[in-house]
Amino acid sequence: MSSTLSEYDPNSNKPLQRPKEDPTHLPPDALTAHGFVDYSPETAATVCGPRTHPPLDALFYAPSLPPSLLSPRTFPGIEEASTKALIKTLSDNHARWHIFFNYKGFHNHAAHHLLAIWALGAPGPVIEAAYATHCEYQRPAFDSPEHINNHNFYKHLGDERYYASYLDYFTSELLQKNLNTCLEEYVFAPAANFGDMRPEMLSRFMGGVLHPLIHTGYGAEFNSVGVSAEGLAMAAVQGSNPDLIPRVWFPDVVSSGNAKDCNRTALSILALVSCDPRFSRIQHTDEEKMYLKVLTDYGSIIHNYVNMWKFDISTEGIADAIEELSWANVVIYGVGGFVPDEPLNADFFLMHLVTSSIFLPSLLAYVDKFSSRRLLLMTYFTASLSIYVARGRPQLDIRSFFKNTESLLHKVPGPTTEPAWNTLPNPTSDLVHTPNAWYPMIQTTIVHPNEHLCKTQRALAHHSSLYGNRERGWCAQPRGRTGVTTAQVVREKEAEDKVCLQELDGTLFVRVARLTQNKLGWMREGEMAGDWDNKGFF
């Protein structure tokens, strides 16, 4: 495969356009890009070829069971052929392509797509066809100007030219140590975030609309050294935001478990943020700067809200914190994007709050220190609220959402069936045609070419499997909250009533999934593909 300058547009979202080719043929070593003397985007665009060290079979292999009981489970349909296709395509993607597919820092999503549909039960040919759609526009991998080692690790952070060297570095570290040690040393440790060179690695880990966290989360969930190394290397070359994390959140001594005193949940804090008049003047900003601007202008307010969140970070109690964040982010994306009788405003940025949330259990399983668990959760909540505010803080009307989505539960597009006379509960019921709304959605999602749809539906299905039995009113705040004044209690109650927090039940996830599927298109059933929204809520 070769690229020419005629195919190269440095200002395009997809600067390299190629005809479809065999996506899993590794070119010979002679085609590998070695030793750019004068790096430039133009030079990189003319060179194609994989980097093939260390041996790829040490990095990519059949996924093992996930590390946490709260991690997603795979769907039926996984077989030897589909697993071989997964390993082959992940290996090729790792060797052949850069982590950014353009010069704006847009992320290579091939590994996300492949792992998500494999976990949903996609057969081998679908996995290979999905990978081929990514190969049409990726940037070739190339060697960095110099190697990364312990002495110059902080020198080239944020510089995408050094992705290959950071990838080599983290691959070596993961093979010698483990993911637990690497996360602690290179993401959570104060030395990885503060100092003369201000490495800010946790900020980078949460940057790029959470993509380094997502990518490393895939590595953690599927026990993949190769994908974990890609995620950590992506974080190293990602930009940082000094306003994301207060210094006081970095305890230098391991803390004990933070006992929950029932003051605030993530959902009650979300209700307060959604009603806070200080966020009412958010203006549309360039998408590359919106996150930075919100944290610059409103970071202290958002930090104050996150500091109100009380949660248990012990091994036994952390499940509640994960659940609260999962509900909050699905409410932001699904309820925030809903207007009766209109297609879902499926915001591209808010969608990432959903797709990132399923990796919290797998990542936290590799975080041993209580202080680092607390740091990860508080920073993630800060990033989630900041993205919510940056996109225009859409109104949250949970009562209207549930009232106007009831019909979505058991009706899906596609050809109808003719049930036998004694089919349960009766042959004319909607339940006969769609007894479980998830199955047709997963079927059509597997073969849909959009790489974010499979990630979104998999996340929503997982949350439904964990929390679908929650009854209406489950998240109502307990009486007798401690440490708050009467005025604060009244304010919080008003905010919760305004968003109708008490109306939430476990059908939230299937309703949001149906709205998302309707927006992106039921392609297997004959509809044309839709797309995500970028207009925001301004």
Image (cartoon, rainbow, N blue to C red):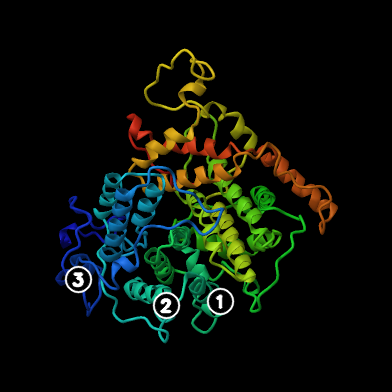
Q: Amino acid at mark 3?
A: Thr
Q: Whole-percent x and y of residue 4?
A: 15, 61
Q: Whole-percent x and y of residue 96?
A: 25, 64
Q: Say how many tags the image has.
A: 3
* Secondary element at image label 2: helix
Q: Circles 2 and 3: CB distance less than 8 Å?
A: no
Q: Whole-percent x and y of residue 450?
A: 36, 45
In screen coordinates, is 203 left or right of 116?
Answer: right
Residue 476: which quarter of the image?
top right
Q: Nearer the viewer, mark 2 or mark 3?
A: 2
Q: Is residue 414 above or below residue 529?
A: above
Residue highlighted by disc 2: 176
Residue highlighted by disc 3: 32
Query: Mark 2 Cα within 10 Å, few/some/many (few <14, many 20+)?
Result: few
Q: Nearer the viewer, mark 1 or mark 2?
A: 2
Mark nearer the N terminus (1 vs 3): 3
Front-most of 241 and 55? 55
Residue sitting at 49 percent across and 58 percent down?
290
Residue highlighted by disc 1: 189
Q: Amino acid at mark 2?
A: Gln
Q: Whole-percent x and y of residue 373?
A: 61, 66
In screen coordinates, is 248 left or right of 421?
Answer: right
Query: Mark 3 Cα within 10 Å, few/some/many (few <14, many 20+)?
Result: many
* Secondary element at image label 1: loop
Image quarter where the N terminus lies is bottom left
Mark nearer the N terminus (2 vs 3): 3
Residue 110: which quarter of the image?
bottom left
Q: Is residue 173 above or below residue 472?
A: below
